[in-house]
Amino acid sequence: MTVETMKQIIRPYGDTTGDAMIQVSFTLPVPHGPRAELAALQLAGKMGLDPASVVHSKAMGPDFTFFIVYGKATHLIDYAGIEVPEGREFELLPPAQVNAAVQSVLGRRLVVVGACIGTDAHTVGIDAILNVKGFAGEKGLEYYREIEVHNMGAQVAVDDLVARAKAVDADAVLVSQVVTQKSAHIHNTKQMAAAFTEAYPTSLTGGLGRPLLVVGGPRFDTVTPSDLGVDRIFGKGTTPGEVASYLVHALVRE
């Protein structure tokens, strides 16, 4: 079998299979009108949509226009050639095994501090992981007998987060970032990581010298933990059990 025959070429699907039709939406910083629609069509052409048509346009104030464009994509995808990243490197554990591992190795409760930092006021994510009510049928970390949770809530200053982590001798710090305009989640996370690095001297034994830094949110898929200076990134749909299992993997079993 040749390399060519091993490919699996796919096209987008609009009205009929393989028609390559797609729909995109965007906003341009121009007043609504015929010239704005022509600008939208030029952009669509440069995106690889040919032919394309503006199916909806609406003024967003005097100087902006929102568009929905429908067109035929000229690009093809080799589905067979896509490499899927490896899955999680740790085992998912039920709460009883997490508690047993923490108690047997640490001999005390594992201390976790969580917060939304900066101007982020969206606590749904951090509450889903920390609060006992949990998420997706799993109870949050407050449910775990051997995990001590300190939920600082929303709009927490980085300095206050560091101070609380030091005050309670935290093993891990969990930060949720949902607000992503102008890459606020990236800037806030880097600021947080730098503050912890400065506040905690590097361990002489080669350890981190600081709490484990874990960040989560829906828009971190374009960066790696090393880019941000943290130990782990969790994306959308993460459950409390995944976070608890990771903490055991990172802090207890190793």
Image: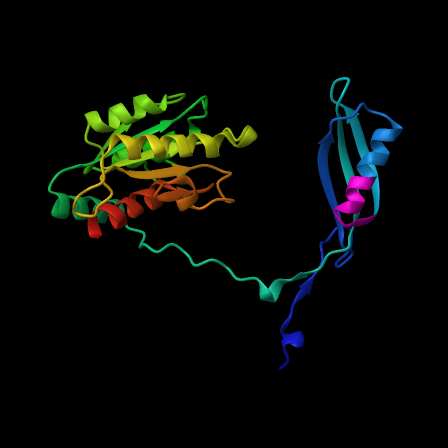
> From the viewer's perspective, is 252 left or right of 46?
left
Residue lying at the far bottom in this picture: please name it. Answer: 1
Q: Quadrant of the N terminus?
A: bottom right
Asked if residue 131 can be seen in this view, the reply is no
Residue 36 appears in the figure: yes
Does residue 167 appear left or right of residue 152 in this picture?
left
The percent position of residue 124, horizontal first and vertical second, equals 43, 29
Q: Percent x, y for residue 33?
A: 86, 26
Q: Is residue 71 magenta?
A: no
Q: Which residue does the image show at 35% across and 27% down from the upper left? A: 115
x, y percentage for residue 159?
Answer: 32, 22
Identify the residue shown where x is 78% and y is 56%: 19
Give the farthest residue toward the right. 34
User: What is the span of residues highlighted in magenta in the rendered image?
Assistant: 42-50
Q: Position of residue 143 (x, y in %)?
A: 26, 35
Q: Which residue appears at 80% of the width and 36% of the height?
A: 40
In this image, 226 relative to 200: left or right? right
Does 12 appear above or below 153? below
Quarter-of-image position of residue 200 = top left
Residue at the image point whose x is 82% and y is 40% from the top: 42
46 in the magenta segment = yes
